[in-house]
Each structure stands twice: as C-alpha cells, then as structure tokens.
Image: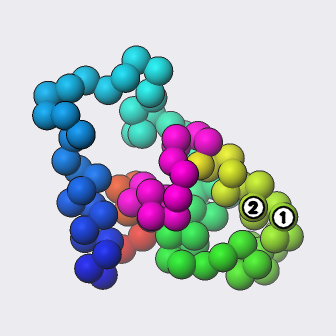
C-alpha cells in the first residue's frame, strides 16, 4: 500500500544524518520477539484489533492487549504506524 511505502521511506531516513543511535537504544534488529509476539505484531500490522486477533490465535482480547504492550515496550514504539513499519522491516507483512 502507499501508506506502507511511505512509512518505510521515512523510517529508513535517519533523523540526523550520520548521528549514531543513542547509547540506551537497542538496535531494532537486536530486539527478539517471541513467536507469539511476532504473530500478534503481524496481525496488528495488517490492521486487526485485539478483539479480532484474539480468536485467530486462541487468546483473550486482554491477553492480546498485553502482548501489544510488551511488543511496543520491547521495540520502543508507541503507535500502530510504528508497529506496521517494524513488522514490514522484519518481513512479517508483505
């Protein structure tokens, strides 16, 4: 989609050219997600909401929401748009 291409473009551009990442920031490639977290991230990136993801994975909506919070914390993200970018970068969505 156009939105996904735009997100990829802007995510690839550094905020300050040549600036190293902050010392307390883990490189996204170094952050490991569990298989279940990756499954949740993939579906969230495709536009599903927790109540829709839950039955697909055999979970409750509150468990899915808990996974989403954990994913956001691990990846240092705060929005669905950032989650979509990260899922695309990890090859979880086409």
List the residue tagged with mark 1. 62
The answer to which image quadrant residue 58 occupies is bottom right
Measured along the vertical axis of the image, is residue 91 above or below residue 59?
above
Q: In the image, what residue occupies the spot 50% across and 70% down?
A: 45
* Residue 84 visible here: yes
Instruction: Pick the residue in front: 55 or 23.
Output: 23
Residue 19 is situated, as x and y percent measured from the top left of the image, at 20, 26
Instruction: Pick the residue in front: 66 or 57.
Output: 66
Q: Is residue 72 left or right of residue 85?
A: right
What element does badge 2 sit on? helix
Q: Is residue 72 left or right of residue 53?
A: left
Residue 74 is situated, as x and y percent measured from the top left of the image, at 58, 40
Judge the density around disc 2: few (<14), some (14-19), many (≥20) Cα neighbours within 10 Å. some
Q: Main secondary structure of the magenta part?
A: helix
* Residue 34 visible here: no
Mark linked to residue 49: none
Residue 64 is situated, as x and y percent measured from the top left of the image, at 75, 64
List the residue tagged with mark 2. 65
Whether residue 77 is in magenta: the answer is: yes
Q: In the image, what residue occupies the spot 61% across and 42% down?
A: 73
Q: Are marks 2 and 1 in contact (CB under 8 Å)?
A: yes
Q: Quadrant of the N terminus?
A: bottom left
Q: In the image, what residue occupies the spot 77% across and 55% down?
A: 66
Instruction: Pick the residue in front: 91 or 24.
Output: 24
Which stretch is magenta? 73-87
The answer to which image quadrant residue 82 occupies is bottom left
Identity of the residue furthest to the front in this view? 16
């Amino acid at each position: 989609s156009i939105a996904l291409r735009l997100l990829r473009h802007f995510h690839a551009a550094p905020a300050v050219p040549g600036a190293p990442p902050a010392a307390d920031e883990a490189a996204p490639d170094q952050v490991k997600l569990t298989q279940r977290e990756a499954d949740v991230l993939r579906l969230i990136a495709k536009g599903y909401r927790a109540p829709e993801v839950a039955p697909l994975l055999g979970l409750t909506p509150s468990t899915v929401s808990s996974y989403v919070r954990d994913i956001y914390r691990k990846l240092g993200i705060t929005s669905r748009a950032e989650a979509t970018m990260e899922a695309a970068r990890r090859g979880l969505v086409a």
